[in-house]
Image (tube, rainbow, N blue to C red):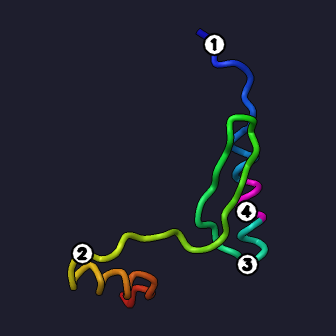
Amino acid sequence: MSRGPATFKKRDVTRAVKAIEAAGLSVARVEVDKDGKIVIVPGRPELPTPQNDLDAWIDKHADAAEGH
């Protein structure tokens, strides 16, 4: 059983994401519809609400550089 022709390629998505990042934006989500239309939603990915104090601390300090 054949899948049919590809409507988009991985390199298309990669190029689009790199272009957004080169513009100084971060990517929250990438959507590709069945016709191959690529939609990039800029912003930070939505993270779940921390469940406890340790998770809250980790989320707060996750972006800090490691001081090793």
* Mark 1 lies on residue: 2
Q: Nearer the viewer, mark 1 or mark 2?
A: 2
* Mark 4 lies on residue: 18
How dense is the environment of label 1, judged by Cα within 10 Å: few (below 14), some, or many (20 and up)?
few
Cα gap from disc 3 to disc 2, whole angstroms: 31 Å
Q: Mark 1 vs mark 4: which is more N-terminal?
A: 1
Q: Residue at x 63, y 13 (%)?
A: 2
* Mark 3 lies on residue: 24
Name the amino acid type tagged 1.
Ser
How dense is the environment of label 3, judged by Cα within 10 Å: few (below 14), some, or many (20 and up)?
few
How dense is the environment of label 4, judged by Cα within 10 Å: few (below 14), some, or many (20 and up)?
some
- Give the image location of residue 49, x and y in percent: 34, 75
SS at mark 2?
Answer: loop
Q: Is residue 37 left or right of residue 60?
A: right
Residue nearer the viewer, 26 or 18: 26
Give the magenta range. 15-19
- Give the image location of residue 25, x and y in percent: 70, 75
Residue nearer the viewer, 23 or 49: 49
Secondary structure that dominates the magenta span: helix
Label at residue 51: 2
Cα gap from disc 4 to disc 3, whole angstroms: 10 Å
Quadrant where the N terminus sits is: top right
